[in-house]
Amino acid sequence: MRVSASILFAAAFLGSVAYVSAADVQVRAVRDKREVSIAYPERVATKLIAIAESSSVNSTAYAVSDETWARILGSDSFVHAVFSTPRKMRLWDRDFQGRKERMVGEVLFPLPMNSDPPHIYLKTEKETISLTKYDPYALRELALEDDLRLRASPRYDLLLNLPSKR
């Protein structure tokens, strides 16, 4: 009886851990003005973080205005991740002096169908940051997410033909 009680406790604990990690991030995706259900929000959020951290240029000075965030959220296609607890990310600073750790609460990534997304946007407690010049392999990983249906677009399908990284 003690063994089965221990097993039940362990199963309940592991189930609650899985629930907490899934609830740590909410991901909203819109494609062609339609909401898209995301089966694995944590995985999509991890891929968005990889895109942001692979970026080599801070474009905040010329890519962020007061209406940027609202404009993208009103666009035809994007992915938006909101973290219940801000995530620590290593991002290029505005002065191009190197990467600095920042606590990011939201990530917003436009998904244009006729070009590469020019910037990825992040919200910290104090500001909106824009980054660009990200690793195409990081974008490819996001394009492989079936729920986003990006492979149906010739623009994103090209990413699948990138040579393997060594």
Image (tube, rainbow, N blue to C red):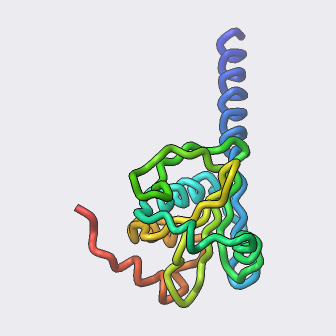
**81 vs 103: above or below:** below
**83 vs 138: above or below:** above
Q: Nearer the viewer, residue 91 or 45?
A: 91
Q: Position of residue 29 (x, y in %)?
A: 69, 69
**76 vs 13: above or below:** below
**Which residue does the image show at 67% across and 33% down from the upper left?**
17
Which quarter of the image is occupied by the N terminus? top right
- Extreme-top residue of the structure: 2
Picture quadrant of residue 73: bottom right
Picture quadrant of residue 110: bottom right
Q: Position of residue 129 (x, y in %)?
A: 60, 61
**Which residue does the image show at 56% across and 68% down from the upper left?**
61
- Extreme-front residue of the structure: 95
- Residue 72 is left or right of residue 113, and the answer is right
Q: Position of residue 141 (x, y in %)?
A: 46, 65
**Which residue does the image show at 65% across and 60% down from the upper left?**
128
- Residue 160 is left or right of residue 73, and the answer is left
**Which residue does the image show at 59% across and 56% down from the upper left?**
45
Picture quadrant of residue 82: bottom right
Q: Nearer the viewer, residue 106 or 159?
A: 106
